[in-house]
Amino acid sequence: MIPPIITRFTDDDLYKFTMCCAVIDNYPRTQVKYKFIDRASLCYPEGFADELSRQIAHLETLRITDEEIEFMKRRCPYIPCWFYSFLKGFRYDRRWVRVSQDAQGHLSVEFEGNWSDTILLEVKVLAIISALYYIMTGQSAKIDCTDLYNRSIEKGRRLLEAGCVFSDMGTRRRASFAAQEAAVRAMKEAAEKYPQATGSFVGTSNVWLAMKYDLTPVGTMAHELVCAVGGMYGPQMANYLVMKAWASTYRGALGTFLYDTYGWRIFSLNFSEDYANMFKGLRVDSGDNREQLCLIEEKYRSLNIDPRTKQVIFSNALDTDRAIELQKFAEGRCLPSFGIGTHFTNDFRGIRPMNIVIKLVAAKITESWPFFCETCKLSEDHGKYSGSPEVVARFREALHLE
């Protein structure tokens, strides 16, 4: 019997909680569908779907504790107090999830239900799949967290001495909970060991680990927010509508916008001077980082805003070397920072990190609608597109993309 992989309610990324709050505040009756995507088309071991179902059923036992709530109130003052009443009453339900496996071992996972409920499944289920795969394929024996800790100290030293402002964002595809904990502990201790360094380790996306190590939980939003709104109202103004909803809920706090759901061009058209001034910065998650920064600079200057005053968070498949190179390129042009995931939490000799995601694929405005509206994601990298080919083609046509 494999022990439960997720055992704490806030062993999750902050952005799932902040988005859940915004969804309740702005789209309380919206229904959604999600779909698991394995970009490597792996064949999973026999019985994987059954064990995954058992792990998901175990989520029904999780409850947020008063300690977790008090920590979030202290470190996340932008979250309105009513949201914690929702979390205290929140219960996972296995009926929101359908899991199956075909004869070749390919895995199918789908969610369906109220957006405010199912939104809290994604990160936990991905973390379960990742850890469970290594357990059931016998690769967990190669997970040496002591070695990871030692190498993470060195990664932290290099980033700090290069002047990088960085955070851990590695919950979704971590090798195990212990692996992420080792990496977070190492980064915190590296920051304490090298106080003269010009860089800083600003925290982790994982709320539980932030609480355990007295760090700041970091994160804002994900593509799914824009995808859902794009499906319901069309992609042309989806970014604008999400910025408006986000500003309504957070009143200018959590002001980093993830802009690449439908590419730079349509976002730039939506990014008016009022929102450019309100939001503290933008997150680059696809495309060529240098080219994207040049576009961002040009846009801010066109609005008479100095890009050197704006934060740009880079999070596109970063490792230590790439972050340091980007720091040199971006320094003096913006306020650069770096969200690093798999390179921190799944960097083991003899183990290949998984390339898995769960994407929102359909939405309907209320439960009374007789049909869902399909949606997709069109990032700056075609390899990161999600959605059926027909929906992708329709959205590309709507956005006048070549």
Image (spheres, grey):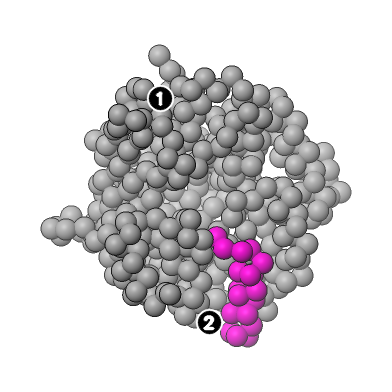
Where does residue 293 sit, x and y in percent of width and height?
Answer: 64, 69
Which three-letter amino acid code belongs to the residue tagged 2? Glu
Q: Residues within 10 Å of mark 1 (few under 14, many from 20)?
A: some
CA gap between label 1 and label 2 equals 52 Å
Q: Is residue 61 above or below residue 223?
A: above
SS for tag 2? helix
Residue found at the very far right of the displayed protein: 196
Residue 144 relative to residue 91: left or right: right
Tell me where the magenta segment starts and ends, as one range: 286-305
The reply, left or right, for residue 137 in relation to residue 368 is right
Quadrant location of residue 109? Answer: top left
Principal secondary structure, stretch drawn in magenta:
helix
Nearest the viewer among 250 and 277 is: 277
Q: Nearer the viewer, residue 86 or 219?
A: 219
Residue 273: assigned label: 2
Residue 309 coordinates in the image, percent (x, y): 68, 72
What percent of the width, then of the height, locates residue 323? 71, 54
Q: Nearer the viewer, mark 1 or mark 2?
A: 1
Name the residue at 86% across, 49% down: 196
Could you tell which of marks 1 and 2 lies nearer the N-terminus? 1
> Where the N terminus falls, by quadrant?
top left
Q: Which mark is residue 45?
A: 1
Q: Residues within 10 Å of mark 2 (few under 14, many from 20)?
A: some
Could you tell me which secondary element the residue under label 1 belongs to? loop
At horizontal 61% and vertical 73% (from top left) the residue drawn is: 296
Type of the residue with mark 1 = Pro
Camera-side residue: 153 or 379?
Answer: 379
Return the x and y of residue 352 as percentages of the image width and height: 57, 35
At x 54%, y 29%, the residue is: 176
As drawn, which residue projects farthest toward the front?
Answer: 104
